Image: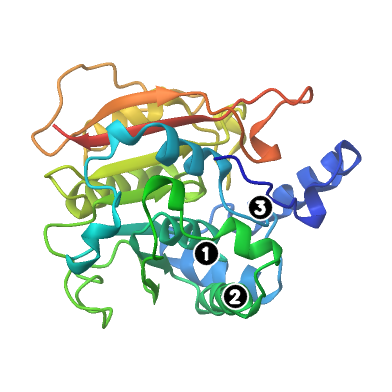
Amino acid sequence: MKVAIPNPPFNTSSADDHAIQGQFQRLRSLFKDSDYSTHPENWDTVWKESFTPWDRGGPSQALDQVLSLHRDLFPKAPNSSDDWDKPRPKALVPGCGRGHDVLLLSAHGYDVFGLDSSPTSSEEAKKIERKVAEEDNEGKWKELYAPRKELGVTMKGRVMWVTRDFFEDDWVNDSGYGKVKNGFDLIFDYTFFCALPPEARPGFAKKMSDLLNPDGGRLVCLEWPLGKDPSTGGPPWGVSGDLYLAHLGHPGQELPYDDKGRVMNGSADTTPDALKRLARMQPACTHKAGCDDQGNVIDRVSVWSHQ
């Protein structure tokens, strides 16, 4: 199902492109040469200033499309009203921001953890959730976040907002929402991986491997920004399909980069805890930021599992 997602004010026309680049330049300057240990505090600072040029103003159409049209890739997806007497599959959105994709996954029937290290971000996400709940049946948010009845989902999943550092040990069990048995059945990454400097990527891959359910769990990555030169720094850092393959295939390992910021690991050998890419596709629609000047989709969606 394709839904109409509103564009945020800073992303409404091509005339704004120069201003948007200026916003990201400022963002990069805030993080340039700063130790990674200071990044969570820096992110909360920009949230307090309402400086969020990465926010898309709505959920990911690409994620909605993949979950709707490629059901075979998600063996643990909710698909029947008969399942509601059983534990629901669990999903995670790290670096969830205002939580649009958390609410989308809830509409697909998952119990969803929306994780962000910024307390201000978490409060903004709760505001969006309340706004959705308060709207009448004709409201724009109701359409976006209604249960996907055409997929057999008649009841939205539970939403849990967690303000913790993704890299912390055992934040799941310490969150106050109980244990997540066997790990998450679905994890969605969009603007989280690209916000991390290269030195944090091995830890990202290791944590994803640890958190993903080894029995049918799926990691979905909306790869962005693919057209950005990685040597220009970040956030957001330029990414590539090879970058995801290298790190997710070697969780926790330090990998070499060339002088242009491109990963050099070409080994086909993977580690026992590696994630395997099941599919990589071009979505029919995505946020404007994932398209070129002619409106052609640049973004790719990749789906991963344990081997």
Distance from Cα at disc 1 to Cα at disc 2: 8 Å
- Ranked by sequence position, the earlier of labels 3 and 2 is 3
Residue 89 visible in this rendered orientation of the protein: no
Q: Please state which of residues 202 and 3 is positioned toward the viewer in this rendering.
A: 3
At label 2, the amino acid type is Glu
Q: How crowded is mark 2: few (under 14 residues within 10 Å), some or many (20 or more)?
A: some
At label 3, the amino acid type is Arg
Confirm or deny contact between disc 1 and disc 2 (CB under 8 A): yes
Q: Position of residue 141 (x, y in %)?
A: 64, 64
Which residue bears the numbered disc 1?
Answer: 99
Name, please, the residue furthest toward the bottom: 176
Which residue bears the numbered disc 2?
Answer: 124
Q: Quadrant of residue 278?
A: top left
Which residue bears the numbered disc 3?
Answer: 56
Distance from Cα at disc 3 to Cα at disc 1: 11 Å
In this rendering, the answer to whether 34 lies above or below 284 is: below
In this rendering, the answer to whether 104 lies above or below 165 is: above
- Ranked by sequence position, the earlier of labels 1 and 2 is 1
In this rendering, the answer to whether 105 lies above or below 255 is: below
